[in-house]
Amino acid sequence: MKKTALSDRILREVEKPARYIGKEINSVEKDPEQVDIRFAMCFPDVYEIGMSHLGIQIIYEQLNRLPYVWCERVYSPWPDLHRIMKEQRIPLFALESQEMVKGFDFLGITLQYELCYANILQILDLSGIPLHAKDRGEEDPIVLGGGPCAYNPEPLADFFDFFYIGESETVMEEVVRLRRDMKKAGRSRAEYLRELSHIPGMYVPSLYEVSYREDQTLAAFSPRYPDVPARVKRQVCMNLSEAPYPEKPLVPYIKVTQDRVVLEIQRGCIRGCRFCQAGMIYRPLREKSLDTLKKEAERMLEASGHEEISLSSLSSSDYSQLPELLDYLIKNFRSQSINISLPSLRIDNFSLEVMKQVQDVKKSSLTFAPEAGTQRLRDVINKGLAEEEILAGAGAAFRGGWNKVKLYFMLGLPTETKEDRKGIAHLAQGICDAYYEIPKKDRNGKCEITVSTSFFVPKPFTPFQWAPMYREGMYLDRAKEVKEEIRAMKNQKSIRYIWHDAKGTVLEGVLARGDRRLGPVIEYAYRHGALFDAWTDYFNMDIWMEAFAAAGVDHEFYTLRERDTEELLPWDFIDIGVSRRFMEREWERAREGVVTPNCREMCRGCGSRSFGGGVCFEERDDKGHSVNAWKSPELSTLPEREEDEA
Amino acid sequence: MKVRMKMAKTGPIRYVGHLDFMRSFQKALRRSGIRAAFSRGFSPHMLISFASPLGVGLESVGEYVDVELAYRDPFPLDPVEEQRLESIGLKNEDLPPAPSSGELCRMINRELPEGVRVFSMKRVGQMKEKAMALVRGADYLVFLEDGFLAEADLTEAVLSLLAETSIVIHKVTPKSESDVDIRPLIYDLGVMEDGFCAREERFLSFDPEGFSRSLFMSLSAGSAANLKPETLMAALCRKLGKEFDPCALRILRLEMYAEASKAMSELGEAF
Ligand code: SF4
């Protein structure tokens, strides 16, 4: 039995020691002597969060299929262990081998949210890897980043050797193979990175030069050498049905956020909500075939022993064969006592009928995400969810026995006014009304409406990438307005209001649309104690304010101003496939309050057709509608409900 | 058919707490292909019960868990049992016959995490009490980190502790505070010579490196009166006038006993 990297004594001292012992079911062990490349894949947050991430499991599967690579996992040590490791100078280790990360060939870090940037420096620091890419030697791992925040990698440019722009299923193997070949040939780190920059989608920040204008905006961004591409194109996997998938999912010992089989049914989204980065950077929508999904569901349940399976996608209702898929899942797995969880379904007669079969109506709640309180603002953000639809959905649900509804909104959206904020309360009241319209004898007690708001943060590669943000206090004022209006409603006792903390919002906004000048800020903040900023209990904005001051950076430059569409943006060198012209047009239409149809209603020529597949190539009728524009089937075509009464 | 399994939990998995371990065990059962019985309703669960939760960091070669399997019980069931089975949608006659206990052990052991092993499985079909309700005592080996209580004469301390007619400890829980006399809960306590039970060794990957001294303890256990080995160690430290360091211990549970000092494994029938 392999020794744990941490001594018995330390494991007894720290909270949840099982985070650090590895050996989970289906984790991969290889003989280090038999592999050429050691790859550490890191999610820079606590184990329970990191283990729930599907992307890492895909990369883990994909890399470990290569006989010459051993891919292992790394997560952020919790603050209690962080302190011990710093004090006792214990180097950070990978879970499988329990060996030092510093000895690896690659350290890959997934960038899922901006508030984990300090944790990235923690990973480097505890590993004993120089924080700055330029200070790393031949023996240090090559540090790469990928994931949604890599679409504006600039604030992290100092700390990474390269960024992988796109999906791992495309050129990851090439990246690793090149390293192996060049290592064998005795070539240097710098030579490797230069060569790597020729692989499409690979961005090596040290090979580019940046200059700024007097007004602080970007003046120019260009490669230092002629052989280095000026634009980096996102790499997209066009055949998801054949792509590697974790057929033997890792099964953690301790309860993690996603303690179930996750079945990714499609990637991308047809909807085009203007605030949503995922809706743009994963275009076009690509579905997995029904056969693939059936096979994967079966294999993953069998290999993991999980008692639950959940569908994963940005908008599951848009999967063109959803009725067939759900029918299959219910018929095959309910009898094996497996729970089926269906997040991100639109609430309509079809989904309600399905949900009735898989969950306890009395205990479960229904979720709507109108995102904005009035139709006007919903049109601005292109959230194609009309008030009538919400009320009809809620009414149908109430008649079906549900009495709990959750509503999600954002505050701080472009063009938002007082009316829009008050509209949130009014919509909640409207739903209450729909409930109390039902005859008393058919109701199930009181209705419980939970209204939850978060603060909108403009993200790169969205039509709102030019939008201004606000100061922290203004966010809280907005939440207060909503709260007061809710308290003034007739059924206010049935409405609960929860709002997200505004504390991290401003920092998230700065980092999301920042540039290279933020590197020293992040470093200062980490060195002065910033860690686990995504955790309200640990987040301390004072450290960051101090860091901005120390680095001489005006953080409001990044948040308060409305950017001009003429301005060169730090992430403009990345080509995600969706054209800048499309974004500009959408920004324009947003301000005019004009809705843009979704990809299946009408192709708006965003540019993603260039990837050569997905929704862009679905068959269309003479009106331009895709034949897969899926409508709720008649209830009679639904699978029969099996008697399941205890 | 209800079965009782005896198993070991050793190695790094000792850092997985009881609830998480239970979940892992159930997932292993699902993977193994053994047919477990489930409750009905929207979130069905296995009918499973552990004899006694094992604290985080403790190892054991004497864990017991009762599991209801969806195999035919070879003996006729009484009407109450039959009704209960019916309520979860099962009928004894319609269930497939059980594979041998040896085969079931092999099936589950293929799926259990490193350090966890099922040694034996017995049919406990007609027994109404759950394993949890049966436990009365447990044996432990407590290993001391070298350096901890290094100068102390352990044998002497043990003898004088046992000579006392009452050993009162102050027990503080989040809900209450009380004085408890633990003397009656100690059945046996002694310093081990040369370490280790040869009987159990083959099951263990226990590596006592850095822990050259150990104590044997036989203590009251179960829901009525449970004495943790750590509590007794604390009392021993107090006797020695030394500070107690819970992180300097490695504890191995050897066996659990039911009434009349019968090892739990002696209850039930082979199949
Ligand atoms: S090219 Fe048309 S169909 Fe394809 S993603 Fe863009 S808008 Fe949608």
Image (cartoon, rainbow, N blue to C red):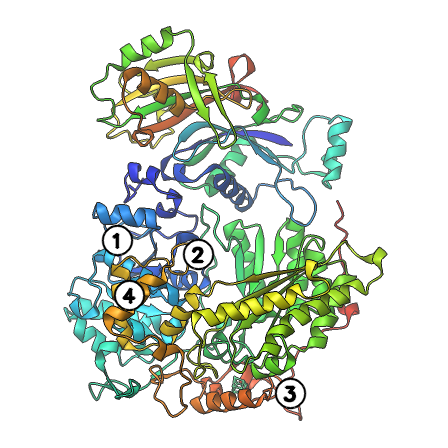
Q: Around disc 1, counting alpha carbons within 10 Å, would you say few (fewer than 14), some (14 to 19), or many (20 or more)?
A: few
Name the quadrant containing residue A388.
bottom right
Report the chain holding disc 3. Answer: A
Q: Around disc 4, counting alpha carbons within 10 Å, would you say few (fewer than 14), some (14 to 19), or many (20 or more)?
A: some
Amino acid carrying mark 2 in the image: Ile
Q: Residue drawn at (36%, 63%), measured in percent from left and top? A: A541
Answer with mark 2 or mark 1, whichever residue precedes in sequence.
1
Q: Which residue is mark 1?
A: A32
Report the chain holding disc 4. Answer: A
**Residue A606 vertical position relative to residue A71 in the rendered view, above or below:** below
The Cα atoms of the two marked residues, 1 and 3, are separated by: 54 Å
Secondary structure found at label 1: helix
Q: Which residue is mark 3?
A: A625
Q: Position of residue A573 (x, y in %)?
A: 33, 85
Left or right? Give the position of A137 relative to A312.
left
Q: Which residue is mark 4?
A: A546
Q: Around disc 2, counting alpha carbons within 10 Å, would you say few (fewer than 14), some (14 to 19), or many (20 or more)?
A: some
The Cα atoms of the two marked residues, 3 and 2, are separated by: 40 Å
Depth check, mark 1 against mark 3: the one in front is 3
Depth check, mark 1 against mark 4: the one in front is 4
Secondary structure found at label 4: helix
Instruction: For ligand 1, tell me if the residue under mark 1 lies within 8 Å.
Output: no
The Cα atoms of the two marked residues, 3 and 4, are separated by: 54 Å
Q: Which residue is mark 2?
A: A49
